Image (spheres, rainbow, N blue to C red):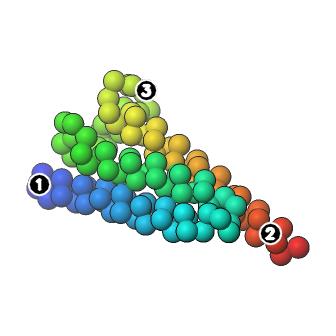
């Protein structure tokens, strides 16, 4: 595959992650007063959107994300990708915690 085509596809996916995460955070923010756990989900989506944005605009980012992302597994903390991996993981944990709180609230409301 052409390097530039793969670079466009990969950066397009990060742009989609950013835009979808911002839209989801906005939707969760609108429901935060009514639904417990929505604020946790909003915070998680905001962290995940930062991950998507920085993956595109990070210094020295050349489209070799998947190769560099493997460095996270060996904890090479000198790379920007390590910190992006941490932000995405914390964001996912917050999203899942918020989903659990929403589901727990819905279950109690039905009883």
The percent coordinates of residue 34 (x first, y second) are 68, 69
How dense is the environment of label 2, judged by Cα within 10 Å: few (below 14), some, or many (20 and up)?
Answer: few
| Residue at the spot of label 1 | 4
The answer to whether residue 62 is visible is: yes
| Marks 2 & 3, CB-CB < 8 Å contact | no
Estimate the x, y position of residue 23 in percent, counting from the top left.
43, 66
Vertically, is 19 above or below 82? below
Whichever of callouts 1 and 2 sits on the residue coming sooner in the sequence is 1
Question: Which residue position is annotated with label 3?
Answer: 75
Q: Position of residue 4 (x, y in %)?
A: 11, 54
Determine the image quadrant of residue 15.
Answer: bottom left
Which residue shows up at 45% across the image and 41% down it?
A: 87
- Which residue is located at x 42 percent, y 27 percent? 74
Mark 2–mark 3 distance (CA, rounded to whole Å): 40 Å
Residue furthest to the front in view is 33
* Total numbered badges shown on the rendered structure: 3
Query: In which quadrant of the rendered image does the N terminus lie?
Result: bottom left
Side of 74 relative to 90 (left or right): left
For numbered disc 1, what is the local secondary structure?
Answer: helix
Which element is circle 2 on? helix
- Residue in view at x 49 percent, y 61 percent: 25
Q: Secondary structure at mark 3?
A: loop
Residue placed under numbered mark 2 in the picture: 107
Q: Residue 51: x, y in percent? A: 38, 47
């Amino acid at each position: 595959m052409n390097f530039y085509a793969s670079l466009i596809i990969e950066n397009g996916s990060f742009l989609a992650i950013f835009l979808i995460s911002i839209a989801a955070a906005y939707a969760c923010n609108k429901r935060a007063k009514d639904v417990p756990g929505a604020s946790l989900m909003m915070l998680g989506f905001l962290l995940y959107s930062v991950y998507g944005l920085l993956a595109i605009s990070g210094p020295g980012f050349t489209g070799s994300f998947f190769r560099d992302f493997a460095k996270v597994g060996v904890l090479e903390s000198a790379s920007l990708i390590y910190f992006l991996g941490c932000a995405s993981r914390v964001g996912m944990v917050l999203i899942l915690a918020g989903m659990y709180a929403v589901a727990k609230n819905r279950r109690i409301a039905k009883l």
